[in-house]
Image (cartoon, grey):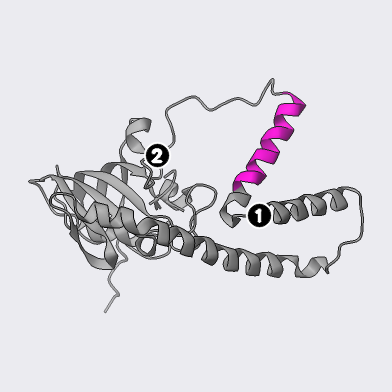
Amino acid sequence: MKLVLSLFLMLSLSSCDKLKEMNSGSKSDKATPKAEGASTKDTLNAMGYESGRQLMAYDLSSSELNTWFKGVKEGLAGKESKVDLKTVPMLKAKFRDERSKKVAAKEKEASKPYLAKMLKEDGAKKIANGVIFRTLVEGKGKNGAIDKVVEVHYKGMFKDGKTFDSSYDRKKPVKFPLKSGPMGLIPCWVESLQLMKEGGKAKLTCPSEAAYGDRGRPPVIPPGAVLTFEVELLSVTDDVAPKPPAPKK
């Protein structure tokens, strides 16, 4: 489902990949942009832009960015690398983890006032995993429950109010099994949807620990980001996955 909430969003949401995967079938109704007619200049610019978006998660300083550009130029010139290229994957993974933790710590500190503000909203309460849950519309149907299939409309926002994913914009709700784990929803959604009934709408404020953690889901979800969702629970049905046959006696 495009973003979000492992947004599956699944908001491993992941841009969100799982978030965006979660909401599988959440592709935009807009026509797919066509590449025909794009100039070489525009294509190269887009390639550079994409690389820049990926680098945003590392919060590089000017000097670090200059070092990165220097490496690009040296590679293009065919110069010998200063490190054994076989070690590059390990070096990249180590740098990514270390820098993500640093960026996440900074983001989480900056998010504290926002979390406090959300908790003060009328009717807001803190539930499992530090999630702040606020009912906007009381539902009257069935409760969301683990291993049930839920259909929802939702909008995902950063703490500055910017929307990063929305089924409303795509004019198509999403449907998925309510479960956690590597192939399931982020904890924020799992906990919150169990508190909702069909026809209900709620506002979920998810600290990073209940969303995408210190790694985030670059380039869409920054490391340590707090996410807020408005979720409307449309229906709850039995799991559509076939159950394995009982063992023969």
Say which residue label 2 marks. Answer: 162
> What is the chief secondary structure element of the magenta stretch?
helix
Kind of residue at disc 1: Ser
Residue 218: mark: none
Q: Count numbered badges in the picture.
A: 2
Quarter assignment of residue 152 = top left
Q: Position of residue 155 (x, y in %)?
A: 32, 41
Query: In what element is the residue under mark 2?
Result: loop
The residue lying furthest to the top in this view is: 37
Q: Residue at x 59, y 68 (%)?
A: 98
Mark 2 Cα shell of 10 Å, populated few (<14), some (14-19), many (≥20): few
Q: Residue at x 39, y 60 (%)?
A: 208
Query: In what element is the residue under mark 1?
Result: loop
CB atoms of marks 2 and 1 within 8 Å: no
Residue 50 magenta: yes
Q: Is residue 149 above or below residue 174?
A: below
Residue stretch rendered in magenta on the structure: 39-53
Q: Residue at x 83, y 68 (%)?
A: 83
Kind of residue at disc 2: Lys
Say which residue label 1 marks. Answer: 61
Decide if residue 185 is in sight here. no
Decide if residue 58 is in sight here. yes
